[in-house]
Image: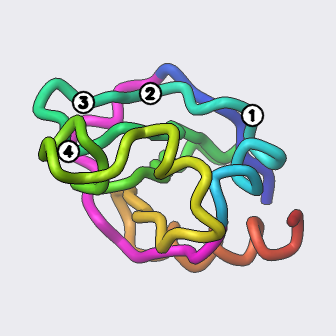
């Protein structure tokens, strides 16, 4: 399965799982994030992705940076973490395992 960035609306996707990796690994695989920050500051970094079959997947942080709370780390500090348990969103629970495997195979 392959993933490409998408501009399709991801509204209505929801949390389906996590993947433990670094920001640098995700950039290596998918390029720079193509979404975020969210208006409410809950998300600072997000990739909106799509499979060839049209499944939508999002990878994002949640409430981790100064954009959400002033006492939290900066976006730059967050992106420099050794690893983070990134959130995975989608319309189906199956997207989490698929993207997790894809990431592990490509880092």
Say whether residue 77 is left or right of residue 81: left
Q: In which quarter of the image is the N terminus?
A: bottom right
Q: Mark 2 points at which residue?
A: 35
Q: Mark 3 points at which residue?
A: 38
Q: Name the residue under label 4.
A: 42
Q: Quadrant of residue 4?
A: top right
List x then y, in percent, for residue 84: 52, 69
In the rendered image of this protein, does residue 104 appear above or below residue 88?
A: below
The part of the chain drawn in magenta is 8-21
Say whether residue 55 is left or right of residue 3: left
Which residue occupies 18% across, 35% down? Answer: 41
List x then y, in percent, for residue 96: 51, 72
**Residue 9 magenta-highlighted:** yes
Say whether residue 87 is left or right of residue 59: left
- Farthest top residue? 7
Q: Nearer the viewer, mark 1 or mark 4?
A: 4
Q: Distance between the residues labelled 3 and 1?
A: 19 Å
**Considering depth in this image, is 9 or 22 the residue closer to the camera?**
22
């Amino acid at each position: 399965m392959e993933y490409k960035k998408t501009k399709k609306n991801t509204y209505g996707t929801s949390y389906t799982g996590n993947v433990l990796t670094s920001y640098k690994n995700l950039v290596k695989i998918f390029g720079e994030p193509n979404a975020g920050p969210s208006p409410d500051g809950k998300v600072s970094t997000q990739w909106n992705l799509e499979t060839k079959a049209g499944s939508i997947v999002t990878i994002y942080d949640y409430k981790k940076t100064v954009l959400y709370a002033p006492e939290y780390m900066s976006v730059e500090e967050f992106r420099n973490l050794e690893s983070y348990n990134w959130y995975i969103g989608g319309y189906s629970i199956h997207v989490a395992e698929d993207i997790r495997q894809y990431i592990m195979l490509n880092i």
